Structure formats: C-alpha cells, structure tokens
Amino acid sequence: MRRELDRIALLEAEAITIMREVAAELERPVLLFSGGKDSLVLLRIAEKAFRPGRFPFPVMHVDTGHNFPEVISYRDELIESLGERLIVASVEDSIAAGRVVDETGPGASRNRLQTVTLLDALAEHRFDSAIGGARRDEERARAKERVFSFRDRNGQWEPRLQRPELWSLYNGRIRKGESIRAFPISNWTELDVWRYIEAEGLPLPSIYFAHTREVVERDGMLLAASEYLELFEGEVPFEASVRYRTVGDMTCTGAVESIAATIPEVVAEISASTKTERGETRADDRATEAAMEDRKRTGYF
Amino acid sequence: MESATIPSLGTQPVEEGDLLRLLVAGSVDSGKSTLIGRLLYDAKLLLSDQIEALEKTSIDRGEDELDLSLITDGLRAEREQGITIDVAYRYFSTPQRAFIVADTPGHVTYTRNMVTGASNSDVALLLVEAPTGAVEQFRRHAAIVSMLRIPQLIVAVNKMDLVGYAQERFEAVVAELTPWVEQLEIPQVTFIPIDALGGANVVDRAESLGWYSGSTLLHELESVSVVADRNFSDYRFPVQSVIRGGGGEGGSARALAGQVAAGIMRPGDEVVVLPSGERSHIASIETLDGRLDEAWPPMAVAVRLADEIDVSRGDMLCQPGNRASVTENLTARVCWMSEKPLLAGARLLLKHTTKTVPARVDQLVHRVELDTLGAEPEPAALELNDLGVISVSTTTPICVDPYRVNRRTGAFVLIDEATGDTVAAGMVLHSDEMREPRGATNVIWQDSRTTRAQRVERLGHAGATVWLTGLPGAGKTTVAAAVEERLVASGRPAYLLDGDNLRHGLNSNLGFTEADRTENVRRTAELARLFADAGFVVLVSVVSPDADARAAARGIHDEHELPFIEVFVDAPLEVCEQRDPKGHYARARAGEIAGFTGVDAPYDSPTDPELTLDTDRLEPGEAVALLVDLISARVPDPRG
C-alpha cells in the first residue's frame, strides 16, 4: 500500500500540529475569527486538534461595526453550534471610549482602527498569543512571516529581527508583555482553502456566493453600497451579481462579478481568474507599496 | 514615492501533481530575485494585476525594462537596499508539480534566515556567478544544505551573458566546484548554465547556450525526484499534549495527541513510554473523522493507550525492541545564529520534539573551515553563522535519534533563556549514555587527603565566595575592601580578589573581547572557588557584565557545593560616570577605549541576586553592614 498524504492532508496535519503547539507552549492563547473563510478553516482545525476535549482557548471577533450583517449572524450560529466561548471586541466601543477617531469622508474605513481595538482586547484579557488565519500567499509582507511570529511589548512586528524557525520546532518563549501571533495555515493557498471547505462540507457566509447586490465601482473594484460607504461625486450605485473573495470591513472589501453559486463553481472561477485575491478585493492593500508591512508592524493581523 | 502594490503570487490552477519544497539561495547580487521573477514570468505564472503593478513600479523607478527582481522582495528595506533580508515563501504550480519556494537571503548577516528556509526543503537551488565562480557564501550555503541533509542540490551557474555564454567558462566553474562539493554529503548535485536577466535556459532553451544539452532549469525542477523524507522502520511518537474525554471500553480516559515522527502505528501495538519505561498497548488511534487502522508520518492523530499510566507532553512512545536513545549527553552539529558568540560552558534551553529542557554546552568540539571543509579543533568560540560540532548535556533526559536516521527526532534548537531568541539549529550526531569529563580527558583530579569538613573543624573557618558585579564606578571594590577589613578585624579569613588586580598577573594575557572577558570570569571564579574551599570568605570585585558568565561562575561553586553569594552593586550609569574613579569613562567617551561596559558594551543586570546594594542611595557604611550581615547569615562563622 502506498502511504502518501495528499497535499490537503499534509497541510491539515501541519496546521493541527501548529495549533496544538500554540496551546502547549503559550499560557493564554486566543483564536481570532473574522467570519471569513480562512478563520472558518481555523475553527475546523481546532476541532481536529482538540476534540473530544474543549478548545483550550476562547474565540475572539474584532467587530468593526461595519461588518456584513450576514457574517455576524453566521458567526453567532457557528460558535453556538461548536459550544465554544466567543469574545467580541468592538471598534464601536473603542470609538466611544475615545481610543480611536472614526475616519470620515468617502474614502473612510475602519480597517486601520481595528488594530487598536485588537491590541486593547489582547491586553484586557491578558492574552499572550493570538491564532490567526493569515496565509503567506496573500501578500508580499505576509510571505515573510514566521508561523510563530514574535511581537514586542507594543504588539509590533520587527521584520528584520524575526527569530529563526527551524523544522517544526516552534519557539513560543516570551517575556512578560511580549506576545506571539501564530498562523497555522501559513502554507495554504486560496485554492487549498476552498478545496478544504468543500471536502469538509463547511458552511460559509452567503456573501461568498453569487448574489444580487447594490454596488458602486471605485478604483476598479466593486464596493457594497451601504449606509457606511460615503459616495464620491458621480458614483452611482447599480445592481450586479457578485460574490466576495475575502470578508472584511464593508467599506474596503471589494466584490467580484460572479455567477458562481456553489463551491465547485467558485473554485472553477478562481482557477480561471487572472487576478490575485487581495489585489482584486482589498482597497487597504492598494494604498502604497508597503501598505501591509506598515500595518503589520503596528500590530495589524 | 508611492506606487501600486505588487501583489504576492496568487493561486494558480493546481493539477494533482506532487508537492516540492524548494530552497533558493545565492550570495548577494548573484541574481536570485531576478531568477525567481524570470521563472514565474516566462512560465506565465504571474497574474495580470501582478504584471501591471510590476510595470508601474519599474517605470516609476526609471527603468527601461521590467525589473523582475521586484516581484519577490517584499519588505520596504529590501526594496530600498536591493537585497533580500528574510525568507519569503512563494507558492506556484505548473502542470507537472506544485512548488513551495523558500526564497532566502544571500547576505552573510542573514544566513540564519537561509537556514530557516532550508530546514523544511526537499531540493536546494544555489546560484553562483559564471564570472566569479564560488564565493565563501556559496560554500557556507552548500555546507548548510549538506548538514541539513537536503538530498538534491542544483547549482545554477548564472550570468552566462557576462562570459559570452562560453562553454569553457561553465566547465571551468564546474571543475572548480566539483572536488569541493564531493566532500559534502549531498547524494545528487547537478550544474545548469543560465542567464536569468535575459531568460536563457530558465524556462526556455536559448540559442546562445546551444552547446548545452541538459535540462532547462524549470524542466529540472519539474522532473527531479522528491525523496520522501519519511522513516517507516522505527516507531516514534512524541507526545504533544494530553486530551481529556472520550475513551470508554478498554481505553484510557485520556488521549495522547501528536504527530507521528516515524513508523507505522496500529491498534494493539505494544508500546513503551520513554523516558519512564512504562509499557502499555495502543487501544485506538483517533481523529475527528473517526478511528484509524494505522497512522504514519506525518499524520496528526490522538492515540489512546489501554492503561491509565502517567504520560505527558515531552514523553515519547516507542516499541520495546526499537527505542530512541534516552540520554543527557549528546554530540551534535550546529549552526550558530546569534551575534553573541557561543562559548563552552554556555547555559541555554534545548527544544527537541515537544520537550524543552535546560542544557549546557560542555565543549566546542570543532568548527568547520569552509574553504577546506576541515575541522578547527576546540575553537575558543563559535561566531555568528559558524558551523561546528558541540557536545551538550541536559538536566533531564531527552529521547533522541541521530539526525541522519530521523530528522524529527534528531533535530533541536537552542534558545537563549534571557531573550527567548532561537540561537542555534542542532542536528544530533550521537548520544552518550555516560558523562565524559570536559576539557582534557587524560588529566585526573587528585583528591587531597584532608576533607573540607576536617578543615573547617580543625581550623574553624568556613569559606564562601561573595561575587560583586556592577558597572565600573558603581562602588564594588570600595564595598568589598571595607567588608574584607571588617571580617579580618573580627578574626575571620577574608580576601579581596579585584578584577583589575588579577589582570596584572593571572589574567594578564586576556583582553576585552567577549571571549576573553568570559575566560577572565572563569579563571576568577575558579580561583575564588579554591580560596573558598580553603576556608576564606572571598570578595570578588569584577564588572562581569555577562549574565551567562556569572551563571557559569555560580555553576563552578555549585558543582563543589560551596556557597556563592551574588551581590549587585547598583548605581545609575550617570552616577558611575560622574564618579569615574579611574578616568575610564572619560577615555571611553573620547573613543580611546573600545568595548567599555556601560559606554559601548552591554551590561546584563542580575535578575535574581542574593543582594542588591544601591550605592547611590545607601551610605557606604550601610552598604557594608548589609553585606556583612548577609554573609554572617548565609555562612555562619563556625567559631560562633
């Protein structure tokens, strides 16, 4: 008999091992859940790593207040069905507490504000590590990140001084105030994630599939028309059949035109796509050549 | 300058080909980033938004042609300096195969990041430049490839355009490198001539290299056979964590989670738990998707034993007839990755499989000389990026195999406990069941005929070492001399060992390099230990800025069961500098002295001293009284 794991099984085994290692090496981890497909995979990996036991950490969502309503209800149902503990850290609360100031105007986004809310929530709950669903294929700065990524006392990433990371021997040693961000699905591609979701039969928020929505076109991207999106002069909302490739703040996450209503149809569309996931759908990465690196340095996921 | 983001490599259609983990490395300016960009561009693996962004950035920078190297370097500092700093992982697929590429830096400073990328790779691609041939960094990279046991090495001889695509030059490079590479332990080595800038022989054949009949680089990467690095013959399961719940008929209420490191595990197998040696049987192998009939590397599973025996993280399941070596002493190859040199006697943490234990580096056995691959025996230190062999002892047993037999149970990392940094990659060569004396092995300790107890009883003196550490000018010697005076006046033998005084005699051949400072502390500690053994209260006054060196000094006393009292003589730097009793600060500030502690050399403050004397706040008499009281309490005068 040929004893070979296929690509997805290899990636899954690696992710389970990383997830267990975070729980064993760190005292107070938390799993960050955005409602997106990558964090959905994380939850599944956590089940694979710890059942029949409970997760040895809570799940936390950073809610910008401008999330897609479909995603919020999906989140609540999912966590309920898992029987795990959910913490919601709210950007709305950070604004109310005067920790951050809401951006205004047509280009406004709460994406940047999330970082403060996240760091505050990590400190409030004394989490020493956060598990995230970032993948190295998403963006150039992410391609450089370790699986166990060290953060200093201010939650900041210093890309030039990353710890060497050898074999699967992850180093989770930190001093008081320092922390680790851990990325179990670092080596997965967008397509791997979709194939895994399909193979595992995982439920996704409806916005990942083609639906009719009022959108405006901006910088070559389709943004959802909503009460949170202030329009530039001349922008006229129109109806289109779209789906999302990523889930983020409504004001900066672009939709793509699509008629794909099932996972296989989505996989087929992605395979034929000539654009990258973040390049096509994330306004926040388009700002400058090093937009992601700069946000990561200050503590963004 | 603001310009569009170049997205990372996107997802490509994946056929069900196999997965190759590829390491790419080359010295600075060998054209590595350009090669990867060229490979992706010519193989039509870049997406339209990536090409657009690349065009825009190239134009913004005033370049006439596409700068393909820009596709890979992801950090701002990398683009600014035109070098790669950290390993970047890239994912792409051709119809034949899926690749995970570890794109690693060439600069010698960032070798540790190259090792990071290499540790999980199946095939290594190293670049050399046709005009220059091998440089030291190539030798270092190839030696690392060999040490990590990557079975396939492809050497791309780049920049063939600069030598007129001459066959003779390619053959000369091959002839130069072959004898050296053959000394390494790399089973298969292939040389390929290319011109990454112009694209010759990367993806497409080129007329300019018409004399070359071998594969193009891409074809070679697609067809090279991946040797599965999996061991099915031994039986190793390092326990990662214990999961409570489940179980029931005939099984424990706890499951052991982990990743199979070697062997084929089946329900019913008899297993032995190391290091305890307890035995049981496997009741079941479980996953969320159900029970398995067998598990093998690298599956992540949970194993339930038939009996409730004590097993926890860091233990290892083996079979009674095939066990890992349970040891506290091992000899290993290392790549040292810290700016702070490794010296014999260093105390570090060792992380191996799922176990982290305190360890001591007993001996630097040798250092690899890259030019000749010869060994320099017992070097004074291993410096940043040095490769070598060391012997290590751990405080508790670990379960190891030689790295060549099993990567997962033969690999370890060393961690600096104070900073948490990973400072070395280690590969077990062999383990020793018996502890060997360190240093010269043919010298035997000659016991005195008088024991310490007899000495104390007859002479009425009990010795100890009081170690005063602190910045120059903090007041160490002032306090020590006053305490010495008080003790001697009370009839108790005491002796001041002043660091500066020792440098006039015993330590006169030592300078102020890190290695010399450590040796200075070691000799001083050994001397103090002998005085203490003889019944003296020794007052050591020495800056001793390095925490590891002080820990080693304490270790020397612990080994001989002699009291060691660390006193941190603490005063703010400004105060010490103002006092400047010997005028050294002024000279250091003027640049006349280099490596002066507090000015341009670091001081590690003690984290857990027996006593801290803040000489800025305390009156001199108070400080002396505090220390005399502590000595009397810790080492009572036997005469009462």
Image (cartoon, grey):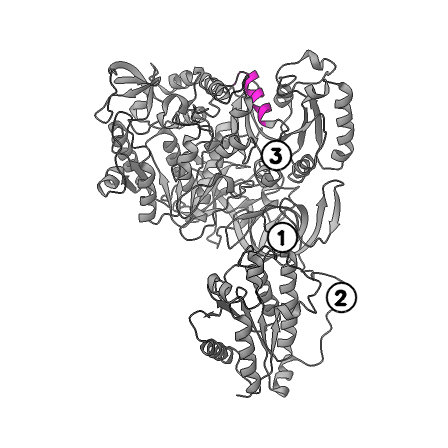
User: Disc 1 marks which residue?
Assistant: B342
| Contact? badges 2 and 1 (CB < 8 Å) | no
Q: Earlier in the sequence, mark 3 or mark 2?
A: 3
Q: Which chain is mark 1 on?
A: B
Labelled disc at residue B106: 3
Question: Residue B452: where, in percent of width, then height?
Answer: 64, 79
Check the picture and name the quadrant holding the N terminus of chain A. Answer: top right
Q: Which chain is mark 3 on?
A: B
Magenta segment's dominant SS is helix
Task: Check chain identity for marks 1 and 3: say if they share one.
Answer: yes
Q: Is residue B555 above or below residue B266?
A: below
Labelled disc at residue B443: 2
Identify the secondary structure beneath mark 2.
loop
Identify the secondary structure beneath mark 3.
loop
Q: Which residues are magenta?
A: B33-45
> Residue A46 colored magenta?
no
> On the picture, is B226 further left or further right than B98?
right
Q: Quadrant of residue A284?
A: top left
In depth, the one of A294 and B390 nearer the eye is: A294
Question: Residue A59: where, in percent of width, then height?
Answer: 33, 40
C-alpha distance separating marks 2 and 1: 25 Å
